[in-house]
Image (tube, helix red, strand yellow):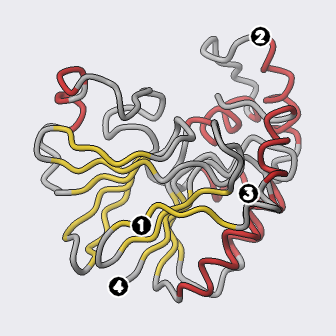
Amino acid sequence: MRVAALYDIHGNLPALEAVLEAVRLAAVDLVVVGGDVFPGPLSGDALACLLELDTPARFIQGNGDREVLAFRDGEESDSIPEPYRETMRWAAQQLDPEHQRVIASWPKAVRVEIHGLGEVLFCHATPRSDTEVFTRLTPEARLLAAFEGLNAPLAICGHTHMQFDRTVGHVRVVNAGSVGMPFGEPGAYWALLGPDVQPLVALAAISRGASRMNETCSDV
């Protein structure tokens, strides 16, 4: 089985379309969408595109998706800085009832058995939190509790919008990067799994639009 891991799309439809073209060429068996389709300028269109894929897809809920649902229900979280709340209100207003139901059904994590890798856990940030921030430089001691007892040799995450590949305890932890709002070099980033893990970037020219999305989207 070959699996495409797509994280942190944030409503950037052009970047998503570029990645999906690369995914089609890779002939994957499954797409895992690792959270934060929302918020963003074209989040509804991006979600509709993902729901119409010919390839089987599994979704997990990111903190952005969760917060947009809360704003849609009139529950504004104190965890969202005031300058970003208007963006969240706007995103919540764009959420139609069917998409609201779909996003609410997404789990916090999924496990997939992948040839050559074994059982792989997909989560948004860490297995214990959808907002926990860490990078390739974060001391391992700070992360051991987050990944202990995982019973999987590999975890795929996102949230920080930066690709990395590191080890925490006995677990290999790979950040797939951000499709729609990369932090760092412009690009629409994703990962291909099976039989190993390949961090990839799609169509640098079109993904310069992903960098411009930083002006209108917020990572929450």
Q: Quadrant of residue 112?
A: bottom left
Label 3 sits on residue: 99
Say what secondary structure mark 1 lies in.
strand
Q: Quadrant of residue 211?
A: top right
Q: Residue at x 68, y 52 (%)?
A: 9
Other residues around mark 4 within 10 Å, as few (<14) / some (14–19) / many (≥20): few
Q: Is residue 48 above or below residue 182?
A: below
Crowd class of label 1 (few under 14; some 14 to 19; many from 20; radius 10 Å): some
Q: Residue at x 53, y 64 (%)?
A: 200
Residue 180 point in image, percent of width and height: 71, 50
Residue tagged 4 = 1
Q: CA distance from mark 3 to mark 2?
A: 25 Å
Amino acid carrying label 3: it is His
The alpha-carbon separation of the residues under discs 3 and 1 comes to 31 Å
Left or right: 133 with respect to 159?
left
Question: Which residue in the structure is indicated by mark 2?
Answer: 82
Label count reads 4
Q: Depth-wise, is mark 2 or mark 4 nearer the camera?
A: 4
Q: Nearer the viewer, mark 3 or mark 2?
A: 2
Q: Disc 1 to disc 2, how far (Cα)?
A: 38 Å
At label 4, the amino acid type is: Met
Quadrant for the N terminus, please.
bottom left
How many angstroms separate mark 1 from mark 4 (CA)?
Answer: 14 Å
- Dot 2 crowding, Cα within 10 Å, few <14, some 14–19, many 20+: few
Residue type, mark 1 in image: Gln
* Image mark for residue 198: 1
Percent coordinates x, y for residue 102 in the rendering: 64, 59
- Mark 1 vs mark 4: which is more N-terminal? 4
- Measure the alpha-carbon separation of dots 4 and 3: 29 Å
* Mark 3: few/some/many CA within 10 Å (<14, 14-19, 20+): some
Disc 4 vs disc 3: which is toward the camera?
4
First along the sequence among labels 1 and 2: 2
